Image (cartoon, coloured by chain):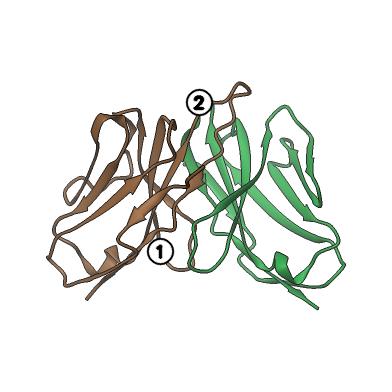
Chain colours: A brown, B green
Amino acid sequence: EAGVAQSPRYKIIEKRQSVAFWCNPISGHATLYWYQQILGQGPKLLIQFQNNGVVDDSQLPKDRFSAERLKGVDSTLKIQPAKLEDSAVYLCASSQLSRDSSYEQYFGPGTRLTVT
Amino acid sequence: SQKIEQNSEALNIQEGKTATLTCNYTNYSPAYLQWYRQDPGRGPVFLLLIRENEKEKRKERLKVTFDTTLKQSLFHITASQPADSATYLCAQANTGGFKTIFGAGTRLFVKA
């Protein structure tokens, strides 16, 4: 099966500019996650969707970050305006409920964002 | 607040030996712990999951344990190979797959 797709792979912008990332999860996966991974750290959950509804966005900086999941499939994450500290890799992951309630997540390759 | 910690120092071992990585959690009891592998420039790849009511899980050369008394999970790679060199991430989540928290990861180097 096809994996999680993300685009673009790399993006360089200046501070105060806007940027958007796109994610296409594995077909049939109801849950979609966006993570921020700063160099040398583990992924930090920004937002979690179940189908097209948000189930957790407690760590999303809502004054500048927004995300949506249209029709419960693709998702976009937007930053407006960007700050220097937003430089990181943005990872998208998806998962499905299995009979044994396993929530293993499948990650995309990530988008490396550099804010100058 | 919920916190998960992994040894930030890199682990260097000789090929053929067993690598043991540690994951500690505080202030909560996760429903399960997951272990992922991450190579440079790539997203994490799922390896193993262990639930709070399980003591041990195995998959080929991998073994993970879960000690709720010590609030610790150990991840073992037996007969390690240079291809096992990567960063290994521990993650916890609550029942229902919510509130996933990742540790910072431990870098493993296996020398031939």
Q: In this view, does B72 lie to the left or right of A77?
A: right
Q: Which residue lies furthest to the front in this view?
A: A1
Q: Which residue is drawn at 59% across and 43% down?
A: B26
Query: In the rendered image, which residue does mark 2 sit on?
Result: B96
Rendered position, A76 above or below A49: below
Q: Mark 2 lies on which chain?
A: B
Q: Residue A38 carries which label?
A: 1
**Marks 1 and 2 in Cβ contact (< 8 Å):** no
Cα distance in 3D space between marks 1 and 2: 26 Å
Label 2: few (<14), some (14–19) or many (≥20) C-alpha neighbours in 10 Å = few
Rendered position, B68 above or below B22: above
Q: Is mark 1 on a helix, strand or loop?
A: loop
Q: Position of residue A93 (x, y in %)?
A: 44, 45
Q: Residue furthest top?
A: A99
Q: Position of residue B69 (x, y in %)?
A: 74, 36
Q: Is residue B62 left or right of residue A6?
A: right
Q: Quadrant for the C terminus of chain A, please.
A: bottom left
Q: Position of residue B109 (x, y in %)?
A: 70, 72
Q: Which residue is nearer to you in this view: B25 or A101? A: A101
Q: Where is residue B24 in the image (x, y as percent from the top left)?
A: 65, 49
Amino acid on which disc 1 is placed:
Ile
Amino acid on which disc 2 is placed:
Gly
Q: Residue at x 50, y 25 (%)?
A: B96
Q: Which residue is drawn at 40% across and 41% down?
A: A25
Rendered position, A99 above or below B20: above
Q: Which residue is nearer to you in this view: A14 or B101? A: A14
Q: Mark 1 lies on which chain?
A: A
Circles 1 and 2 on the same subunit: no
Label 1: few (<14), some (14–19) or many (≥20) C-alpha neighbours in 10 Å = some
Within the image, what quadrant is residue B31 found in?
Answer: top right
Disc tally is 2
Q: Is mark 2 on a helix, strand or loop?
A: loop
